[in-house]
Image (cartoon, rainbow, N blue to C red):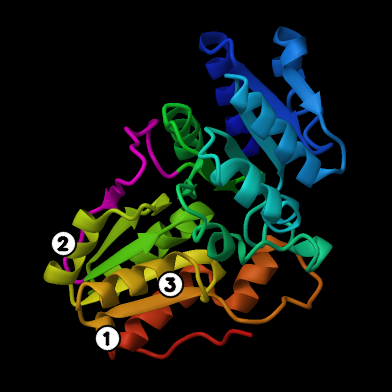
């Protein structure tokens, strides 16, 4: 995903002379092509994320389009006050890009895990929260964010995420993308688990369960039309995310359902548990232990439908 982001950023910079990239001392080689073309439009702010947000706010007040890029956990947690007061309070069109969402950096431990960022950032007024599902969606999401006049937060994976779409989709913020049709279960996926959601759909199909898969790339604002359609037309609505069950996309959907008087028993939320991942291992190992692999996801859905047992998680 980060390679797709760098490529799209470079392409967008050609059309937007006011675009300027700020980095928290990472991605230096990743942006070699961008820096070669636009050497005056790259600022390495060092390991000073709060200060970086302040600089971005100042650039936006001066009429430029700053894009901030750093490791997700350091962006969302360490610079939270500055995001709240420097960017969101002033409703500035700053784009915040957090790389390594969820368990992408699981091998580095709790300092680099990022399973709470959606929960803390979606409460900030005027901030749109976006979690693209594959590299094509990353490119489309950045282009869409640059058309906004408000702050946008984009959480992306790291590297090696598979393509789900055959081509770059027409992506609008606040409008989900139906990736695969179905009639029994509607699976809403956010972020890099989209490929796992599609694979889980295949397992469900072999068990006689037809599942629709939707990339709910925008967590704030939600696609209320697609949610209403899911509640009307499906036996079960499942949300899948590489984020804590507390406060993430599933939590946002649950809040929406409650506010609209809908049957909460129709909703199954799947995500990371309310605990730190304390074992040594990479992202795939962490996903297996958290029950976020295709077989585990399909098993949990089948269990809710009364069709099978669930897989063991931590």
Residue at the (72%, 38%) spot, across then down? 54
Q: 10 Å neighbourhood of mark 2: few (<14), some, or many (≥20)?
A: few
Point out the tag, 3 or 2, that comes first from the N-terminus.
Answer: 2
Q: 10 Å neighbourhood of mark 1: few (<14), some, or many (≥20)?
A: few
Residue at the (66%, 21%) spot, across then down? 20
Point out the tag, 1 or 2, that comes first from the N-terminus.
Answer: 2
Foreground label between 3 and 1:
3
Foreground label between 3 and 2:
3
- Give the number of the disc on residue 229: 2
Badge 1 element: helix
**Overall secondary structure of the magenta stretch?**
loop
Residue 26 x %, y %: 81, 37
Q: Is residue 295 left or right of residue 65?
A: left
Residue designated by label 1: 265
Residue 248 x %, y %: 49, 67
Residue designated by label 3: 251
Magenta-highlighted residues: 164-184
Q: Is residue 133 left or right of residue 216?
A: right
Point out the tag, 3 or 1, that comes first from the N-terminus.
Answer: 3
Residue 116 quadrant: bottom right
Badge 2 element: helix
In the image, residue 155 above or below residue 232: above
Q: Are marks 1 and 2 in contact (CB under 8 Å)?
A: no
Badge 3 element: helix
Q: CA distance from mark 3 to mark 1?
A: 14 Å
Q: CA distance from mark 1 to mark 2?
A: 16 Å
Q: Residue furthest left?
A: 232
Residue at the (18%, 63%) spot, across then down? 228
Please state, as top left, top right, bottom left or bottom right, where the C terminus lies in the image. Answer: bottom right
Look at the image and say whether residue 89 sits in the magenta stretch: no
Q: Is residue 58 left or right of residue 237?
A: right
Q: Are marks 3 and 2 in contact (CB under 8 Å)?
A: no
């Amino acid at each position: 995903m980060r390679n797709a982001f760098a490529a799209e950023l470079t392409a967008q910079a050609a059309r937007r002379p006011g675009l300027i990239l700020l980095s928290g001392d990472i991605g230096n080689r990743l942006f070699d092509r961008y820096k070669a073309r636009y050497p005056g439009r790259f600022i390495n702010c060092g390991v000073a994320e709060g200060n970086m947000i302040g600089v971005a706010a100042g650039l936006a007040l001066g009429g430029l389009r700053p894009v901030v890029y750093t490791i997700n956990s350091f962006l969302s947690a360490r610079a939270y006050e500055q995001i709240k007061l420097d960017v969101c309070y002033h409703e500035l069109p700053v784009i915040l890009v957090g790389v390594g969402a969820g368990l992408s950096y699981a091998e580095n431990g709790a300092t680099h895990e990022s399973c709470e960022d959606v929960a803390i950032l979606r409460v900030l007024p005027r901030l749109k929260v976006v979690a693209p599902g594959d590299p094509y969606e990353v490119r489309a999401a950045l282009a869409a964010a640059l058309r906004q006049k408000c702050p946008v937060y984009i959480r992306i994976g790291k590297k090696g995420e598979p393509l789900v779409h055959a081509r770059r989709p027409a992506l609008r913020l606040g409008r989900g993308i139906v990736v695969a049709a179905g009639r029994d279960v509607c699976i809403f996926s956010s972020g890099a688990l989209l490929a796992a959601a599609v694979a889980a759909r295949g397992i469900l199909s072999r068990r006689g369960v037809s599942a629709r898969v939707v990339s709910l790339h925008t967590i704030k604002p939600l696609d209320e039309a697609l949610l209403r359609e899911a509640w009307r037309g499906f036996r079960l609505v499942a949300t899948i995310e590489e984020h804590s069950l507390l406060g993430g996309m599933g939590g946002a959907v649950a809040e929406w359902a409650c506010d609209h008087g809908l049957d909460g028993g129709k909703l199954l939320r799947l995500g990371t548990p309310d605990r730190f991942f304390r074992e040594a291992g990479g992202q795939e190992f962490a996903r297996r232990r958290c029950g976020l692999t295709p077989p585990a996801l399909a098993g949990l859905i089948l269990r809710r439908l009364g069709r099978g047992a669930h897989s063991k998680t931590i």
